[in-house]
Amino acid sequence: MTVLVLGFGAFGQILDNPSSRLARALDGRGIGMKGATIVGAEMPVSYARGWLTALEYIRRTQPIFTLGIGVAVGRVEGMIESTARNVASVALSDVDDRAVGDLGTGPLDIQSPDAEALAGALGFGVSHDAGEYVCNAWLFQMLRARQRVGFLHVPLEGVPADPLAEGLGRFVDGL
């Protein structure tokens, strides 16, 4: 049984993204009473390639759950995102030098069905605003593709890997 944890790579002035560092630190860890194993990897900060990279990892690993992680500069603690919106800032380009205004056809927003339970298991609060950059776009595209995913925004300082692994174990044991 696999849990996939994907963090975003470098972008802009964030040369060492704490989300990627966290995903890599969790790679290979066994979690929970059910004996799940984390596959941790990096994905590009790209509107187009980020979620497609995630779908390829999902195809290869067949996880029971996928956790996306991104950095939220200005936040002081980790937060689980409950809502993805069909919007992307035209002012913020990704690593492919692409900026978009919307994410194509679909609803205005999509609720993440596991957000509350995930937040409780991990000990984080819930945010209702995933922003207008690649993190929000990733969550929107993944939920629209009907994937079982959650999304964690971490502060620039990151969050400790051990408590996150323990919380993920609690979460997947409850699935």
Image: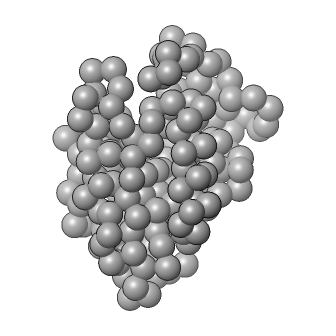
Q: Nearer the viewer, residue 1 or 120?
A: 1
Q: Residue furthest bottom?
A: 33
**Residue 98 in the image: x percent, y percent?**
55, 17
At 58% from the left and 42% from the top, the residue drawn is 51
**Looking at the picture, does residue 131 appear above or below residue 31?**
above
From the viewer's perspective, tell me whether residue 144 is left or right of residue 38: right
Q: Residue furthest right?
A: 105
From the viewer's perspective, tell me whether residue 80 is left or right of residue 157: right
**Residue 151 in the image: x percent, y percent?**
48, 50
**Looking at the picture, does residue 142 appear above or below residue 31?**
above
Q: Nearer the viewer, residue 47 or 89?
A: 47
Q: Nearer the viewer, residue 76 or 142?
A: 142
**Quadrant of res 106:** top right
The C terminus appears in which quarter of the rendering?
bottom right
**Residue 109 in the image: x percent, y percent?**
68, 39
Q: Nearer the viewer, residue 110 or 27?
A: 27
Q: Residue furthest top?
A: 91
At 71% from the left and 56% from the top, the residue drawn is 146
